[in-house]
Amino acid sequence: MDSLSEDLKAPSALIFDWHGTLVDTHDAMFSAMEDMLPRLEELGLVSQLLHEEQCRTEDDARLVRYIRIFRRLHPRILAERRVSRTDIFNAIFGNNTAAKRTAHQAYNEAYRRYFGQVGPFQPGAYEYLSALRSMGIRLAVATNRNREFLEKELQTVDEGRWQQLFEVIVCADDVTEYKPDPQVINRALEKLNLPAGTDVWYVGDSYVDMQTANRAGVAGLFYNGACWERDRIRSWFTRRDAPLAVLDSFEDLMDLLALLEREEPEKFRYSPAEVRPRAFPPPARPEPRVEPDWHPAVVRLIRPEIVLFDWHATLVDTLDAMYHAVDDMFPDFHKLGLMPRMLAPEDSKTPEDAKLVAYVREFARLHPKVKADRKISRTDIFEVLFGDDQEAKQIAHKAFNHYYRKHYGTVKAFESKVRAVLEGLRQLDIQVGVITNRDREFFEHELAAVEDTGWTELFDVAVCGDDTPLRKPHPDQLLLAVQKLDYPPDPSVWYVGDSTTDVIAAKRAGMTSVFFNGAQWDLPWLNRIFPGTHKHPDKPDVVVNDFSEFWALVLACEVGPP
């Protein structure tokens, strides 16, 4: 326990958040979120996402970017399992209450398929809550859960033993607005017949909960069951909305009550020492996500004279059009004679690749998980399906182009910083180019359309899929680009791309491969797709997760190693 404020008074009532404070419903919550986020386009919510520069923190900006592009939660959130859907919706929609209401309604529809998977967030929660009641502290719950879900979970958790613990429960559908609007706490105070003040505590696990407490005029106590680092917690709050205490466990809560009892010895019916249960362990720290850590290669990189970029999923986001075209294209595989030309399962690089081939062969469409993940391009898909069969891949690319004409035109910068990075490279006298498997008719339209003004003036060279006989992963396009710039293909030419195809093309061309990890693969997965084996030897020289890291990489090479 730390960050204890002198303003805190011994409590007459404790109002608790539900998920992430009293109970763990992460399995159901994340399953529902993963069902709901792919629907953002049909719900009209993609256009309602905050612009990255409007986000409260850099983490929120990354989350907005990831959801906008991939319609999924950022892998770090899925790995750490520390935040709630309310935190997510507030991060990506800000103060847009109409958008958040639509998102919550869609979430609830999905949650009905999963709710009921619930357990105490911390061992001994029932025993601690019972001790609080014995002390004469009134207990309540104020939550963004709908009542249909909370009542089922209350009947389920600890075999129903919690049902008599709470004097008042206020749910999202008891009021008109979700947290951080203070209505849920205000309604709880009304039912408890208590005025707002710091002798009423709202105990919650998120920034949104502390905002809600502050707006309701009660004491916010941050329950750090997710084991956030203290500096991270402090960075979220201003002096005005900071919690009056930070608690790591219910043991900390009992310690705090014992401390306050010394100042107000008549406040409680029984002292904490009289009713306190045996000590239970605090919540376990989430297993950390293993981040890619190939940055030591920076010291061995040669300063770039030329930087060539992939287009789709590196510089720009055209995923919606691409996947619509892929959906339309696969039914043609039978009449195009492509089904029997697919790889045998034993020739696939990974078990996942083998499953993709088998699914397309059987159903003539992408596996729903591949479409939901939105992480691989049509070029990668064709590489997985056909391997070294160049003729089959050319037929597939031609079929894709036929359908892409119906969908292309919507193109967005992959990140808000992209244009600034491209301009910055040119200011460093580094030549800049694009290498894409897009046919030129599509690329030139997208190049002129991106960010409404177009990026035509930012590139010294552009090589498209139909400019050479063979497309990536063959190096022909990269070699043509440096030929046009009258420069040799060597490691002072960097190729930045988001796929294994891009890495293979760069290495075969004798250039430096910078893997742009926009999909946020973790280290174990990167080691799987770049195994470095005799059969699959090509590995990137360095991995960057976003354009901030890429720019830092360039500047490090400008300065040179220490």
Image (tube, rainbow, N blue to C red):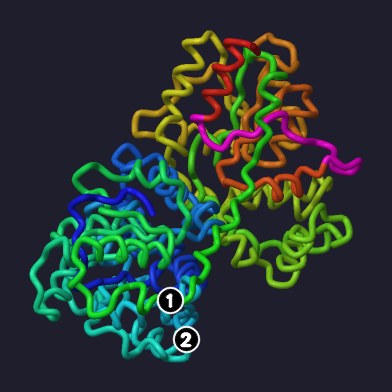
Residue 16: x and y in percent read 30, 71
Q: Which amino acid type is marked by label 1? A: Ala
Circle count: 2
Name the dominant secondary structure of the magenta segment.
loop
Q: Is residue 181 left or right of residue 274?
A: left
In the depicted view, which residue is nearer to us: 90 or 235?
Answer: 235
Q: Mark 1 points at which residue?
A: 125
What residue appears at the point 45 percent right and 88 percent down from the top-left corner? 156
Residue 170 visible within the image: no
Residue 446: x and y in percent read 46, 36
* Placement of the C terminus among the 4 image quadrants: top right
Q: Do the residues labelled 1 and 2 touch (CB within 8 Å)?
A: yes
Which region is colored magenta?
532-548
Confirm whether the magenta stretch covers residue 536. Answer: yes
Q: In this view, does 90 lie to the left or right of 543?
A: left
What residue appears at the point 60 percent right and 65 percent down from the top-left corner? 369
Q: Is mark 2 on a helix, strand or loop?
A: helix
Residue 351's image quarter? Answer: bottom right
Q: What element carries label 1?
A: helix
Q: Name the residue under label 2.
A: 158
Residue 447: x and y in percent read 46, 31
Q: Which amino acid type is marked by label 2? A: Asp
Task: First in sequence, mark 1 or 2: give its number.
Answer: 1
User: Compared to 348, does 476 lie above or below?
Assistant: above
Confirm whether the magenta stretch covers residue 65. Answer: no
